[in-house]
Amino acid sequence: MEAKLGKSVLLLFLFCWIGSGCNPNKDAKNSKRYLEEAISAPNTNVSPRKKGWFEEEEGDSTRQKHLEDNIILYESLLVNGARIYNKFYPQILDAFLFEDKFYLKARFPLEYPGQIQFTFPEYPDYVVTNTGKQAYQVVINDALDLNRVLFQLQYIPSTEDSLVSTHYSFTHVVFAE
């Protein structure tokens, strides 16, 4: 009797488990299928190049990206082979509020031949100090009500640069609302 009851419970458990879709490989298969569908979508081609670099082609446009730990560090758009824009994003190393000042350490991990200039239009009282190769410390004064930092960035290419001059913005959230 106990053996029959044990088998019945086991069969009932397996039936409920399989019938309700509790398959441990189901999510992996779905995400793989989703990726395959995204890659094989009409007029779209995603190809990994070197570690972290990706190109996505759609019609006459090519979007280049560099990611580290799922964070975009660089993005570029080419249309018919001509570069439209290129964006370098800072990696925030440290950020904290002390008294009425906000301190932020950032670096641009990818090397670039030109220059990146940035301002903070919402907080005009700031100081930017170069602390190393492509690394900066920013001190924003009178920052008691600060909950995000809006960077206005400009990439200025060098004379032998294949990148183009680009104005863009980047927001670092300090305190989520």
Image (cartoon, rainbow, N blue to C red):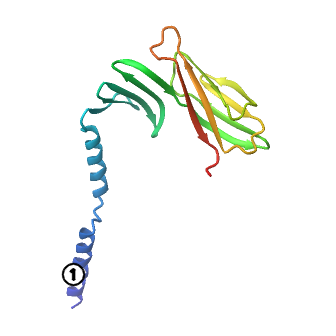
Residue at the top extreme of this rendering = 159
**Residue 148 location, x and y as percent?**
64, 42
Q: What residue is drawn where x is 62% and y is 52%?
A: 177
Q: What residue is drawn where x is 27% and y is 38%?
A: 39
Q: What residue is drawn where x is 72% and y is 43%?
A: 97
Q: What residue is drawn where x is 70% and y is 25%?
A: 129
Judge whether 84 appears above or below 24 on screen: above
Foreground: 5 or 110?
Answer: 110
Q: Is residue 83 left or right of residue 91?
A: left
**Residue 2 location, x and y as percent?**
24, 89
Judge whether 93 appears above or below 81 on screen: below
The quarter of the rendered structure image containing the N terminus is: bottom left
Q: Is residue 42 left or right of residue 114?
A: left
**Residue 121 location, x and y as percent?**
67, 31
Foreground: 166 or 19?
Answer: 166
**Which amino acid, mark 1?**
Lys
Foreground: 28 or 126?
Answer: 126
Judge whether 162 appears above or below 128 on screen: above
Q: Is residue 65 left or right of residue 143?
A: left
Q: Quadrant of residue 46?
A: top left
Tell me the residue that label 1 is attached to.
Answer: 7
Q: Quadrant of residue 65?
A: top left
Would you call the spot at circle 1 few (<14 residues within 10 Å), some (14-19), or many (20 or more)? few
* Count of residue discs: 1
Q: Secondary structure at mark 1?
A: helix
**Residue 80 location, x and y as percent?**
33, 19
Judge whether 161 appears above or below 139 on screen: above
